[in-house]
Image: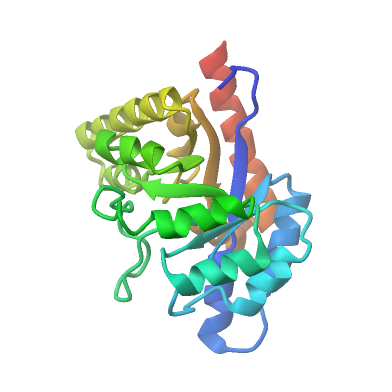
């Protein structure tokens, strides 16, 4: 990545749908949130169509894919059902994530090494359809190398452990997780993978990740939707982008 390249912000609008689904009906509308994100300067929209449809639904994906004015990053499990949906709607990118029915949210990265025989059947058709393929993984050398061998275009580094360490006030773990993410980004970039990062990032944790020069995109959702309750979604996105810009400028100065 060139030092002059901008750092992109993808906004995940899943939890607007979570609020909607808690009561039923059509409000609040996640597509309206995507439109607000576009006005605030987001570079893309991320939405996770889970197998259990606990937040984003099929109709949301159809509307998001049909014209929100921003690239759509569809998060999906590596299943035939999700592959068929992705091939029908042709988002800009598909990020393959692990998925467990009992989890509250994604708990860790995809085990690419263990799924090496299964994933080509998902990755290859997506790539043939012109859809960029991202794998959501931990910053582990074996997982990164396996992702490159499978022909992924992108890896998204899971920042959950890093964010949890900050929340817990564990400075040693926070520093250790940050170093793992930095090393993972360097390795991935050296293998020709585009590097994204996300999961749990907030105003207090975004700067060190944004300052990693190999990272070209951050995907942030839950925090921004929560912060929108207090300051509005567009203001929350604008503040996050400002922190990202400042962090990247500091790294390059």
Q: Is residue 49 visible?
A: no
**In the rendered view, how is the structure colored?**
rainbow
Residue 92: image location, x then y, percent: 65, 52
Looking at the picture, tell me which residue is in the foreground, 219 or 88. 88
What residue occupies the far top of the structure in this picture?
A: 253
Callout count: 0
Q: Quadrant of residue 155?
A: top left
Q: Is residue 107 left or right of residue 69?
A: left
Residue 26's place in the image compared with 132, above or below, is below
Q: Quadrant of residue 26?
A: bottom right
Q: Quadrant of residue 67?
A: bottom right
Which residue sits at x=59%, y=52%? Answer: 128
Which residue sits at x=55%, y=71%? Answer: 84
Which residue sits at x=34%, y=37%? Answer: 144
Residue 209's place in the image compared with 99, above or below, is above
Residue 24's place in the image compared with 236, above or below, is below
Looking at the picture, tell me which residue is in the foreground, 4 or 37. 4
Q: Is residue 251 left or right of residue 99?
A: right
Q: Is residue 4 left or right of residue 23?
A: right
Question: Quarter holding the N terminus?
Answer: top right
Q: Is residue 116 visible?
A: yes
Residue 121: image location, x then y, percent: 42, 59
Residue 89: image location, x then y, percent: 67, 66
Question: Quarter holding the C terminus?
Answer: top right
Looking at the picture, tell me which residue is in the foreground, 73 or 123. 123
Q: Is residue 184 left or right of residue 52?
A: left
């Amino acid at each position: 990545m060139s030092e002059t390249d901008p750092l992109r912000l993808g906004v995940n609008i899943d939890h607007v749908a979570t609020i909607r689904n808690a009561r039923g009906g059509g409000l609040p509308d996640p597509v309206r949130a995507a439109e607000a994100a576009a006005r605030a300067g987001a570079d893309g929209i991320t939405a996770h169509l889970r197998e259990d449809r606990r937040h984003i639904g099929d109709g949301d994906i159809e509307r998001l894919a049909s014209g929100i004015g921003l690239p759509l990053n569809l998060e999906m499990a590596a299943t035939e059902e999700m592959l068929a949906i992705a091939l029908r709607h042709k988002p800009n990118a598909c990020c393959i994530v692990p998925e467990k029915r009992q989890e509250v949210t994604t708990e860790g990265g995809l085990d690419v090494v263990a799924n090496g025989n299964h994933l080509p059947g998902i990755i290859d058709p997506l790539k043939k359809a012109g859809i960029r393929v991202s794998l959501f993984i931990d910053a582990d050398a074996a997982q990164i190398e396996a992702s490159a061998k499978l022909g992924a275009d992108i890896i998204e580094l899971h920042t959950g452990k890093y964010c949890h360490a900050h929340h817990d006030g564990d400075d040693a773990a926070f520093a250790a997780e940050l170093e793992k993410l930095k090393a993972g980004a360097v390795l991935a970039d050296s293998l020709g993978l585009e590097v994204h990062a996300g999961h749990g990032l907030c105003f207090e944790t975004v700067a060190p990740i944004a300052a990693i020069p190999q990272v070209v995109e951050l995907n942030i959702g839950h925090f921004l939707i929560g912060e929108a309750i207090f300051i509005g979604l567009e203001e929350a996105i604008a503040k996050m982008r400002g922190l990202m810009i400042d962090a990247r400028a500091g790294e390059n100065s």
